[in-house]
Every structure is written in structure tokens, then in C-alpha cells.
Image (tube, rainbow, N blue to C red):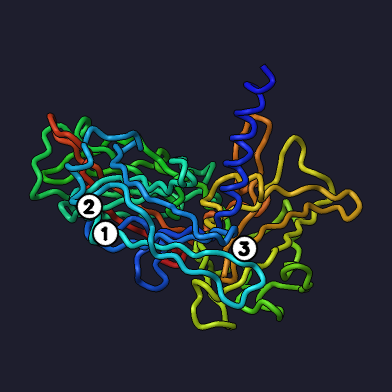
Amino acid sequence: MLKKILLPILVFLCLNVSSQNIKSIQLRPLQENNYSSIVPLGTVLELSFDDLDADAKDYRYRIQHMTHDWQKSRLLSSQFIDGFDENSIIDVTNSFNTFQSYSHYSVKIPNINTVITKSGNYLLSVLNNDDEVVFTRKFVLYENAAIVAANVTRSRDAKTTNTQQTVQFSINHPNLRINNPSQEINVVVLKNENWNEKITDLQPTFFKQNQLLYTYTNKTNFEGGNEYLNFDSKLIRNRSVNTVRIEMKDIFHHYLYPYTYNEYLSYRYNPDINGQFVIRTLEGTDTNTEADYAMMHFTLFADTPFLDKDVYIYGAFNNFKIDENAKMEYDFKDLSYKGSILLKQGFYNYTFATVDKYNKVDTNAINGNFYQTENQYTVIAYYKPFGGLYDRVIGVGTTYFDQNR
């Protein structure tokens, strides 16, 4: 009986340790300063990540076609891929001249072994030698079969006019015959390409010839939030943007300027990259293998701990998920929350998220919620005609909130 209990615990611990050693996961187009994994069909995406064990493991990637709501689709791999849906990642290089050793893995999709032929939602999984999923990432490939025009404005609801933004959009489809939009069309509205902040289950409010209009006044409202905080660790030995102190132990430790919680905070414009991060270093020529890792220390001053809430550091660096490695602990001596994360050199956006006893995540409770915040919204239009086998992505529209427009 004891063996039966210990075995799943040991398996869980091994998987947890393995996933903790995987860092700096990115799935992006090759263009500089493009962080989106929602791209036209045929666009090259590059998956890259580091393994801190630095022992050149044999990782594989697997690609699955998904429905509009991220369930496994009915398509066989041969129906959406020319080649193989699962392959080894053979581009592996070791870190050079860094205190933290690691192996850097990368693979481009499509490649000679894998060419995706259908639009839609895709789940990219990375597997280890034991066929266990180490991590996953979502991406979307779209056609230009329809024109999605989107616009975002300040909320017109008097109750939320100071905190929310309203997205309205249209789907123009002159070359598609859509007989029953309520059954054949699905849409997703994403905020800052964060799949945790989305609105679905929307029906057109008006129908025109070859056009569907979605002009809700409340149903497509998003919380404005606030601009992300940031830091830059491109210099591992010297202080850079928002770094107050550096210590050298086994690796470098960077201490960031503390953030002070203020429930009466007012909005201040601060340009950001909507929670994303960019790996970079000024101390090497190859960012992939010469950028080092530093333990980044975060401090959040609060006179008292938040009642029945835990606090986490949050951003694209952990895939906009509540990560136990990013949990902050309250220090009653300093009246502050403190947390630390091992991160590769670069420019990072981050914020603080709270999680209550009902596991509700709130990314605005600490940093504020304002209609003026500059956000990006992406509208994805899916089309599955009667009798169709899969959800095509027929168009994507993007809009940005700008209070000066």
C-alpha cells in the first residue's frame, strides 16, 4: 500500500522538478519585436527554450489541431500536416561563458518534416524521453478569407466608464456563403493575447449582406487594468532599468526597486509591451547561448497582508499563469511581500496578481484599473459550415485602445 501511495508522489515530484528546469519558453515569428503566435497560415514560428540541467536531453514536439474552444479536433494528422506531427528537436546548443549553465533548444515550424496545411487553433506540446508532456503552447494560423474590422472605445456604461473598454467589430465575408451564422461562426476576443482574458459565445447583433456586426455595449467590455511594470537585466554585472542593487553569489542576484501598493492610485501613462518579454544581453553576441540567468528579487510594500489572498508575480514569462514559483510571501518585519524568480537576461514586463480562497485571479487589485490603459485586442473569427470537419480561422482583426483618438 505504501508503495502505491509513494509512486504517484515521486512521479509528480519528478515532473515538477523537470518543468522547473525549463525556462525562457518562446513561440514567436522570426520578425523582431513581434510577440504574437496568431499568424497567417504559412508563417514561420520559432519555438525556443532553455533546459537548466544542461545535459542535452532528447525532446520532441507534437502538434495537434484543436477546435475553436480548444478541444481536440476530428482531423487526422494527415489531414492537416504534410509530413509528421511529432519530431525530435535537433537544434541544441550549450550556453557559453555564463554562470548558469543551460542547453538551448529551438525548432522552426513549418520545417522540412512538418508543413501545416489547414488554418485553425493548434496546441504545440514538448515531450521528454518518457513521452511525458513537459509544457504546451497555443498558436493560431489564419486565412484571409474574411475581413475582420475591430474598434475599441471607452465604456459607455456610467457604472464602468472609468474602468472598462468596449470592443466592437464586424466580419465582412463577400467570398464566403454563411447560411447560419449562429451555428457556423464562432468568435474569440483576446486582450493582449492572453488566453486567460478572453470573451467568447458572441452572436451577431446585426446582419447585413456579406457582413456580420457585433456592436454590444456591455457584453464585450474588458477591464482596462494598468500598464505593466518593467525591468531590464541586459547588464548582468551592472545596474540597469529599475534595478536598485546587485549581489554575486553562486549566480547574480538583482534586486528591483520596490513597488508600493496604493489603493488610491491614479493612472499614469507608462509605455509597455503588454506583459511580454525580450531576451537580450549587452555582454555577448549570441543572445540564445550567451545571455546569463539572474535571480530577480521583487518587493511589494503593503502595510498589511491582503485578507484571504495570495500574491503572485505575473506576465508572459510564465505564460500568464499562476505559478507557484512566482508566489510572494509577506514579511511582517518589512511590511512587504517578497518573491524571486530565476530569469534570463532581457527586458521584462510584469505585474502582480492576487488569488482569493475561491481561486479567482485578479490582475488589477494591486496595480489599479483604468480605462486609459493602452491595450491590444485581437478578434479571431472561426468558420465551420454545416457538415464541415473543422473550425477554419477565416480572419483576424486587431485594434489598440488609445485615449487620444
- Which quadrant of the view contains residue 390? top left
Pointers 1 and 3 in contact (C-beta within 8 Å)? no
Q: Which residue occupies the foreground of this view, 122 or 102?
A: 102
Residue at left offset 18%, top offset 39%: 207
Can you say whether 223 is above or below 44 in the image? above
Rate crowding at label 1 as few (under 14), some (14 to 19) or many (20 or more) other CA atoms within 10 Å.
Answer: some
Badge 2 amino acid? Ile
Pointers 2 and 1 in contact (C-beta within 8 Å)? yes
Badge 3 amino acid? Leu
Q: Which residue occupies the foreground of this view, 362 or 329?
A: 329
Whichever of labels 2 and 1 marks the residue nearer the N terminus, that label is 1
| Badge 3 element | strand
Examine the rendering and report whether any part of residue 171 can be seen: no
Rate crowding at label 2 as few (under 14), some (14 to 19) or many (20 or more) other CA atoms within 10 Å.
Answer: many
Per the image, the residue denoted by label 3 is: 343
In the image, 277: left or right of 131?
right
CA separation in Å, label 1 and label 3: 28 Å
Whichever of labels 1 and 3 marks the residue nearer the N terminus, that label is 1
Residue at left offset 50%, top offset 83%: 285
| Badge 2 element | strand
Per the image, the residue denoted by label 2 is: 116
Per the image, the residue denoted by label 1 is: 110
Examine the rendering and report whether any part of residue 336 can be seen: yes
Whichever of labels 2 and 3 marks the residue nearer the N terminus, that label is 2
Can you say whether 368 is above or below 132 in the image? below
In the image, 398: left or right of 351?
left
Q: Residue 191 location, x and y as percent?
A: 44, 51
Looking at the rendering, in which quadrant would you find the N terminus?
top right
Residue 70 disc label? none
Rate crowding at label 3 as few (under 14), some (14 to 19) or many (20 or more) other CA atoms within 10 Å.
Answer: some
Residue at left offset 72%, top offset 71%: 252
